[in-house]
């Protein structure tokens, strides 16, 4: 009985000792980069009392008071005018602080930093602070379906937020200039019945991404997760994409009955097929296609010419994923048995790898029904497949990955963080495909996707990237 009474007495006792202080989960709450005028998601801060006695908080206030750009709720009480009073935190207990921010349009193309302080004044008179930080990025807001009906160029130093969708009419060319970023709202897409030209550069790529700039978890931004927006449909003719960084979409590029040229591009982290081309002519060099729930590249008929590309299928948001490369002469997804002839499918100096024993699929009705060979060829590639060594006609001087090798899977690359979903598909210094490319193609593509020279005494690396730890010059 005395022990119980004593325990309750200790639990309900309060101290004004200046040495007794609150403990915060973190002393700085960062909102990262927020699009101006758009409310942030809610951040959560835990405030602990690790003392043997309870603590009373006389007041919690924002340094900037009612003028603050941050909104705060402490233990269920909103800080009206940036101020609230009289909180209690029992011994060994904690309270929640919820925070949001809406930043103004600063009228500038550069980031604007905003800060404030959340002040906790205890009964003892001690004051403790938590810093609030956010970077504001002004943006252009496009509401409603935006229809491009005449030849146009999008050039913006501010992100363009596409809330609905963007449509390019037949016969019309849309050019997207270097440094332009399109932030697509959830389910928004781009549909091109005309021609799409992307004129990005290494220093100023063109970016297609989702519009969420906050985090799913502390360690994982939404920008590193798939299905944040729709994707790009290409019809029409003559699409040329240079230094396009397309990521975190539901699907990547879906093309049908058209020509698509990809140079120095990235298609990464899609919730469906990354590149789906039906009866198209696809040419790609120095291009990375990586991590898709569907296939990285599904080719249904047409032609493909892929040189110095990296196709890495390490999608890990689901235990099931598609192929790194799927060659088909009929539409396997929709059960369409209509025949689409593969004119050619050439892969030279390409990395095609991923989880599993075999990441390359060939599904053909031509070979089974017509007794004719499908025209595809892999020349001096690094491949994760079981079928290559038995076919010396279509698989020429390739290097084959052994899944049981300790260097297999992501250990071939410079950065492979499956927790934070961060990847750098530059080959590691011990990767099996360093210095192994067919040098005949180096003159045509003397630099990699990052403008690092392929001309060195040891030989060029297979794939879109050269190893960065070797001595070489930039052209």
Image (cartoon, helix red, strand yellow):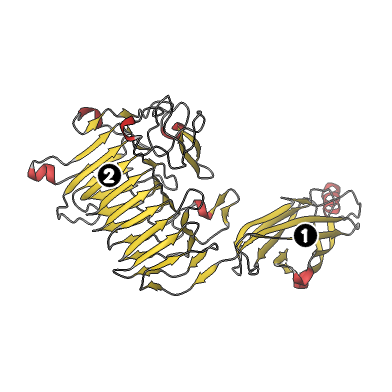
Q: Is residue 438 visible?
A: no
- Residue 322 vs 46, above or below: the answer is above
User: Which residue does the numbered mark 1 point to in the structure image?
Assistant: 117
- Of labels 2 and 1, earlier in sequence is 1
Mark linked to residue 25: none
Q: Secondary structure at mark 1?
A: strand
Q: In the figure, is residue 371 to the left or right of 287?
A: left
- Residue 162 vs 419, above or below: the answer is below
Q: Position of residue 84 (x, y in %)?
A: 79, 68
Q: Is residue 44 visible?
A: yes
Q: How many other residues sit within 10 Å of disc 2, few (<14), some (14-19) or many (≥20)?
A: some
Q: How many other residues sit within 10 Å of disc 1, few (<14), some (14-19) or many (≥20)?
A: many
Mark linked to residue 305: 2
Q: Residue at x 89, y 54 (%)?
A: 15
Q: Residue at x 41, y 42 (%)?
A: 314
Q: Secondary structure at mark 2?
A: strand
Q: Position of residue 150 (x, y in %)?
A: 36, 72
Q: Position of residue 248 (x, y in %)?
A: 45, 54
- Residue 82 vs 132, above or below: the answer is below
Q: Position of residue 57 (x, y in %)?
A: 83, 61
Mark 2 or 1: the one toward you: 2
Who is closer to the viewer here, 303 or 331? Answer: 303
Disc 2 to disc 1, C-alpha distance: 56 Å
Circles 2 and 1: CB distance less than 8 Å? no
Q: Residue at x 58, y 48 (%)?
A: 219
Q: In the figure, is residue 238 to the left or right of 265?
A: left
Who is closer to the viewer here, 123 or 132? Answer: 132
């Amino acid at each position: 009985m005395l022990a119980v009474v004593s325990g309750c007495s200790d639990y309900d006792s309060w101290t004004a000792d200046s040495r007794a202080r609150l403990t915060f989960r973190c002393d700085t709450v960062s909102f990262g980069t927020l699009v101006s005028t758009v409310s942030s998601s809610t951040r959560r801060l835990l405030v602990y009392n690790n003392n043997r006695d309870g603590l009373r908080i006389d007041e919690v206030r924002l340094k900037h008071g009612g003028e603050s750009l941050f909104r705060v709720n402490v233990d269920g009480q909103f800080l009206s005018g940036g101020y609230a009073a009289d909180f209690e935190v029992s011994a060994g207990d904690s309270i929640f602080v919820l925070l949001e921010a809406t930043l103004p349009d600063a009228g500038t193309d550069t980031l604007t930093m905003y800060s404030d302080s959340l002040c906790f004044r205890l009964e003892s008179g001690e004051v403790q602070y938590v810093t609030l930080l956010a970077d504001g990025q002004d943006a252009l807001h496009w509401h409603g379906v935006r229809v491009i009906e005449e030849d146009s160029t999008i050039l913006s130093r501010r992100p363009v937020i596409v809330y609905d969708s963007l449509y390019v009419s037949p016969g019309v060319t849309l050019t997207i200039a270097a440094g332009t970023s399109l932030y697509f709202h959830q389910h928004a897409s781009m549909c091109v019945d005309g021609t799409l030209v992307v004129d990005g550069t290494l220093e100023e790529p063109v970016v297609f991404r989702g519009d969420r700039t906050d985090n799913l978890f502390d360690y994982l931004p939404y920008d590193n997760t798939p299905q944040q927006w729709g994707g790009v449909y290409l019809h029409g003719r003559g699409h040329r994409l240079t230094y396009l960084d397309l990521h975190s979409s539901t699907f990547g590029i879906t093309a049908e009955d058209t020509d698509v040229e990809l140079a120095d591009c990235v298609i990464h982290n899609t919730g469906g097929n990354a590149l789906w081309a039906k009866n198209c002519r696809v040419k790609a060099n120095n291009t990375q296609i990586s991590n898709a729930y569907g296939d990285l590249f599904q080719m249904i008929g047409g032609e493909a010419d892929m040189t110095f590309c990296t196709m890495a299928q390490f999608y890990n948001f689901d235990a099931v994923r598609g192929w790194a490369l799927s060659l088909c002469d009929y539409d396997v997804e929709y059960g369409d048995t209509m025949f689409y002839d593969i004119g050619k499918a050439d892969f030279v100096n390409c990395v095609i790898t991923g989880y599993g024993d075999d990441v390359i699929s060939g599904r053909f009705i031509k070979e089974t029904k017509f007794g004719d060979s499908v025209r595809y060829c892999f020349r001096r590639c690094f491949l994760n497949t079981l079928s290559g060594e038995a076919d010396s006609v279509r698989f020429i001087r390739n290097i084959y990955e052994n899944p049981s090798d300790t260097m297999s899977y992501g250990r071939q690359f410079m950065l492979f963080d499956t927790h934070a979903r961060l990847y750098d598909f530059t080959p590691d210094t011990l990767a099996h495909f360093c210095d192994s490319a067919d040098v005949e193609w180096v003159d045509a593509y003397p630099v990699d996707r990052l403008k690092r020279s392929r001309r060195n005494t040891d030989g060029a690396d297979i794939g879109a990237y050269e190893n960065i730890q070797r001595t070489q010059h930039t052209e």
